[in-house]
Image (cartoon, grey):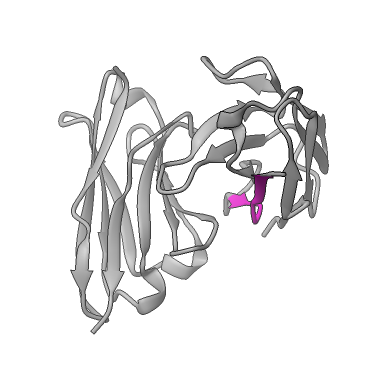
Amino acid sequence: DIQMTQSPSSLFASVGDRVTITCRASQGISNYLAWFQQKPGKAPKSLIYAASSLQSGVPSRFSGSGSGTDFTLTISSLQPEDFATYYCQQYSSYPITFGQGTRLEIK
Amino acid sequence: EVQLVESGGGLVQPGGSLRLSCAASGFTFSTYWMNWVRQAPGKGLEWVANIKQDGSEKYYVDSVKGRFTISRDNARSSLYLQMNSLRAEDTAVYYCAKNFAFDIWGQGTVVTVSS
């Protein structure tokens, strides 16, 4: 199985900050990487697929990059509604696996 | 509006069975892979299974192989998860999600396995 490791596990930031979350795959996955946002008690929401493609309707302050084993999710200027937990996911091979999550909290 | 609505969750005893359903609307269901994903209380996301457009290919996480069966009815735009031999560790919110990009998610249905 491909292990997905996110860092950091938790992050404190302020509105307006630029934030980067890292995701590392235990083996190469090309660009078969997605990012999701989840707020408490809600279903996850898709943000990015194919490592860097923004889902329709997702604000442009979200961006993704990377290929192979190392990937990043960047939020260019944090908004109040961005405080949530973020997950990466690989869909290169079965079983599809998620990172453990990064909790983004208000400083 | 593109929408997925899960149902069928509930409280079941260990060893019991449950069938989850996911009703799709607002898109051509028969043209997309579909997934089940679960989240145990206070934990992260775990992919459970997925199924090809015509049902000819199905994949499962090891922990549910032989116990869970994913299926679909394209005429009814519905996805199913038959869960047998349930264990306490299957307790979770179960979500259905559309496509390999998991671009649309349902609101989830709660499954509790407890005596």
Query: Residue A64 placed where, x, y %?
Result: 74, 27
Residue in view at x 74 percent, y 23 percent:
A77
Camera-side residue of A76 and A55: A76
Q: Which residues are magenta?
A: A97-105
| Residue B102 left/right relative to A78 | left
The answer to whether residue B58 shows anywhere in this view is: no
| Residue B110 left/right relative to A60 | left
Quadrant containing the C terminus of chain A in the rendered view: top right
Query: Residue A27 placed where, x, y %?
Result: 80, 51
Camera-side residue of A39 and B77: A39
Residue B12 appears in which quarter of the rendering? bottom left
Query: Residue B13 placed where, x, y %?
Result: 21, 79
Q: Is residue B37 above or below residue B15?
A: above
Quadrant containing the N terminus of chain A in the rendered view: bottom right
| Residue A68 left/right relative to B41 | right
Q: Is residue A19 above or below residue A100?
A: above
Q: Is residue A30 above or below residue B15?
A: above
Camera-side residue of B76 and B97: B97
Residue in view at x 49 percent, y 63 percent:
B42
